[in-house]
Image: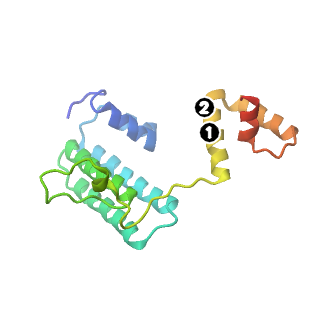
Amino acid sequence: MRHDMSHMYALKSSIEQVLGRQAWYDLKETTSVATWRRYVMKLFDAIELSVETTVTIRDDDWIADIRSNLAHGRDLTIIAKTPEDAIAALSGTLLRQVFLQLGSAPFSRSGDKTPLKPAHWDFSGFRSVQYVQSEQQREELFLSKQRKVIGFEAQIDLQAEHRSAKTRQPYSEWCAQRGD
């Protein structure tokens, strides 16, 4: 591993987005396996906590597969001898995690290759994934996006104007109607 801030910048930046600025400072130029192990383990913990608190409707087998996958990733991270080994443990675990989140992980060891055709990549045989959004969640998403565009103060002013209009329209619809 290179002792270089630009080496694996995308990964380090993504870890910073998930775990905070201190992660960036700790990882930006390190070649320490202990530091990489610590952050990979934190990522596994964050993923597990996120799944446990976010996915409220799930079957027992699925959550067991998720926990098992993350435990395997932790085991591989513990035995990592280099930062690259820890990153490989993270990468492999996340690859499997993505498919588990879609319903089931593929198992294609028997053939020479798996064609990229829908029949081979539909994981709804055991369970279906459904993303739903309540009215409150839609409003929160709108507020978050709007705040990034117009800023906190401007948003507060618009919300005050919305309240004073005494409309029954949700704030997001009111803004859309006005062109905000």
Please provide percent x and percent y for residue 99: 34, 55
Q: Quadrant of the N terminus?
A: top left
Tell me which amino acid carries mark 2: Lys
Which residue is rendered at x = 45% and y = 36% of the image? 21
Please provide percent x and percent y for residue 12: 35, 36
Q: Is residue 21 above or below residue 64?
A: above
Circle 2 sits on which residue?
148
Label of residue 144 in the image: 1
Quick check: 33 left or right of 151? left
Please provide percent x and percent y for residue 169: 79, 44
The front one of 140 and 53 is 140
Q: Quadrant of the C terminus?
A: top right
- Looking at the image, how many numbered discs can be counted on the residues? 2
Which residue is rendered at x = 64% and y = 47% of the image? 138
Which residue is rendered at x = 31% and y = 65% of the image? 68
Which residue is rendered at x = 26% and y = 27% of the image? 4
Crowd tier of the residue under label 2, counting other residues whose Cα lies within 10 Å: few below 14, some 14–19, many 20 or above: few
State yes or no: discs 1 and 2 in contact (Cβ < 8 Å). Answer: yes
Q: How is the image coloured?
A: rainbow
Label of residue 12 in the image: none
Crowd tier of the residue under label 1, counting other residues whose Cα lies within 10 Å: few below 14, some 14–19, many 20 or above: few
Tell me which amino acid carries mark 1: Ser
Q: Is residue 172 above or below residue 59?
A: above
Q: Quadrant of residue 36?
A: top left
Q: Quadrant of residue 111?
A: bottom left
Report helix, strand or loop for mark 1: helix
The front one of 134 and 84 is 134
The front one of 147 and 81 is 147
Q: Mark 1 to mark 2: distance in Å?
A: 7 Å
Quick check: 36 left or right of 138? left
Q: Is residue 78 visible?
A: yes
